[in-house]
Image: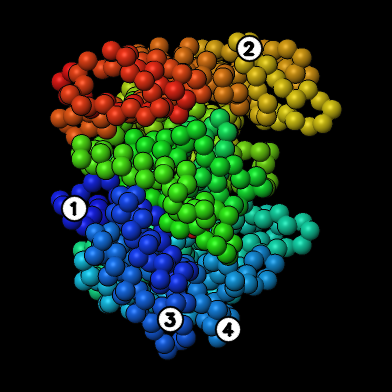
Amino acid sequence: MSCEFKWPRLLGGSGTGIAYGGDYNPDQWPESIWAEDIRLMRKANVNVVALGIFSWDRIQPAEHEWDFGWLDRIIGMLGDAGISVDLASATASAPLWLYEQYPQVLPRDKFGHAINAGSRQSWSASSPVFREHALELCNRLASRYGDNPTVTAWHVGNEYGWNNRHDYSDDALEAFRAWCERKYGSVDRLNEAWCSAFWSQEVHSFREVLLPRHMGADSMVNPAQQLDFERFSNDALLDFYRAERDEIARICPGKPITTNFMVSTDQCAMDYSQWAKAVDFVSNDHYFHEGESHLDELLCSDSLVWSLARGNPWYLMEHSTSNVQWKPVNARKCNGELMRDALAHVAMGADAINFFQWRQSRGGAEAFHSAMLPHAGADTKVFRQVCETGQVLKDLSERRVAGTKVTPSRVAILFDAQSQWSTEIPTLPTTKLDHWHDVRDWYRAFLDAGMRADVVPLAYEWEQYDLLVLPTIFMLSDDAVHRIEHYVNNGGSIVVGYATGIVNDSFQVGLGGYPGAGNGLLRRMLGVSGEEFNIVGVPGADDVVELTDGEVSNLWQTCLTRIADDAQVLASYTGAGALTWELEGMAAIVSHDYGAGHTWYVGCDLRRQDITHLICEQLVPCLGIELGNPGIVTIDRTDGTHVFRCRLNRSGNDVSLRLNPGIVPEGMLLIRGDCEGERVTLRSNGILIEQIHTDV
Ligand code: GAL
């Protein structure tokens, strides 16, 4: 079932506006504190909380015992205060009694050890026993609160796959066998896809299909089997989510349902191009990357989330007011980053800004994770900033920012979760490949050039873009290559990265020269063919290879030995590294006309500044795009009548701008900036939002 877009309403007024709040865990505190929580929430303009995410034990303290009293009381108090509730299915963290009575619900690691209870998500998505208990909980919650007007949305599970992404239990083995049988239909097809003749791995019945469990010191897994296991694990969790969703929707149709994704800094855990079709509205948790990449990384993650939401508003379910507590070094947010991050998410299409969590815990594993209301109380810098942010979001709501749509770019960087999984397989030419990081490098290189690209799932529509970038899409199916060929044939332009199109979706190498995807079709489009991969970085040898234009490659060079007559070599290898590695004079970057369109092949990894150079010198002139000031990111949200032009200072220095002449009276929101006449100076982390008539 594919879901229609449905957005939760706020309580009171028109029910629209930007939602503001966070995870609320009142069950961790005495009830005497709740009234104070709500008073402070109102002070901060909080209008929504996500409730009960980890509260299963408090709701069902024993197998046949239920306690909804506390939940009734807090939902009642929140509703009276005009704060809506995004109610959890509460299944993210199961009670200890359940593990004690049904230890078979625990997932197992690849060595066969049980993943012990005591943390979160210590359950197997393939366990029928766990499913039965989880669905009963969903049923009880939906029956009790389905009609409650304060509950305006359902928050199913929490970050599926965080702690149970891979499960090697016997239940998982049975489910994997059934999954393979559904996918392949016959063992012959499976053997063909898995190249099972290698190392005597042919299966004669689906009963012989194995999970990629630990196989001793030489644990080199068949990559096709591993990739199918990744897909299966994604599907098992998605299926579990759907079962919870359907149980709730059956009893409580009409209220929007979501689950929070994890598109963030270093991860994009699941294949969200599939998950996004199973939620009524897309929601995401984003945790920041300290240092100079902070804002760029946020925008890159948000861009993918925006695409997953198909341009509809999306929900920031969690981010942090300041530091987290799960890294070796946990930097706090300062210099306006709290407000800047919140508004950057709004600029990128979020109509809900939420934090983990409302009140900072005094104990437990997350006691040192920041929150909206810190240990030191309400008379604190963090809480004051939380209140200021709430006020600004209220102001933006009154200006009717909510519901407006982000204006797309003309350039898309394609992302494919399954290719990301394929680059994580340990038997590649190098284990240093990382598709998601290369997406981010390209994203940042475009920002450095003075423009913004979109990040779009490979599985979605991207035909409307003028240029596509395919960075390290290691695995490209024949279908995907045909779609891309159709796009270029009809006038589209593509940039294909060094490790793109090497294997098909069964992890079989395309033959006849690299990149061999689509039975050579990709090669023909690019006008190149390579024989080997030169991987640098081994101790004692030159570890960089230079290019004729001054670019530098640090990891991978595809040894291109054939170039089509009508292709143009834009840069080749030169210098000491090239001599050592027999690359001297070999083509590195090649451009080629194909059909009505154009292709560029970048046969090696490049530093970010080199990618920016390529963008400015080659891609932008070809597309006729006007570049802006690289120190500023500009994002427009529009309802067709007004544009909200959001400009964020990413430079770390003061940047001077001219106000847009079409700005409506009182149509300026300026944070960390000064305005003098027509000019605005934005300080570091400063934000300017101008409300402009579309006809100007
Ligand atoms: C998320 C999780 C929250 C909290 C937060 C801390 O992954 O959903 O419950 O643990 O991280 O950063």
**Mark 3 C-beta to ligand 1 under 8 Å:** no
Q: Tell me the residue that label 4 is attached to.
A: 100
Q: Does dot 1 land on a helix, a strand or a loop?
A: loop
Q: Which mark is residue 60?
A: 3
The answer to which of 108 and 18 lies nearer the viewer is 18
Quarter of the figure with residue 645: top left
- Is the Cβ of the residue at disc 3 closer than 8 Å to that at disc 4? no
Which residue bears the numbered disc 1?
15
Q: Earlier in the sequence, mark 3 or mark 1?
A: 1
Measured as percent of width and height from the top left, residue 13 is found at 16, 52
The residue labelled by disc 2 is 550
The residue under label 1 is which amino acid type? Answer: Gly
Farthest residue to the bottom: give it: 64
Mark 3 Cα shell of 10 Å, populated few (<14), some (14-19), many (≥20): some
Task: Determine which quarter of the picture holds residue 428.
Answer: top right
What amino acid does circle 2 point to? Gly
Circles 3 and 1, Cβ within 8 Å, touching? The answer is: no
* Colouring scheme applied when the structure was drawn: rainbow
Disc 3 from disc 4: Cα separation: 15 Å
Where residue 458 appears, x then y in whole percent? 41, 40
Residue at point 26%, 61% (across, down): 81
Residue at (46, 34) in percent of width and height: 336
Q: Please state which amino acid type lies under the numbered disc 4.
A: Glu
x then y, percent, for residue 228: 53, 57
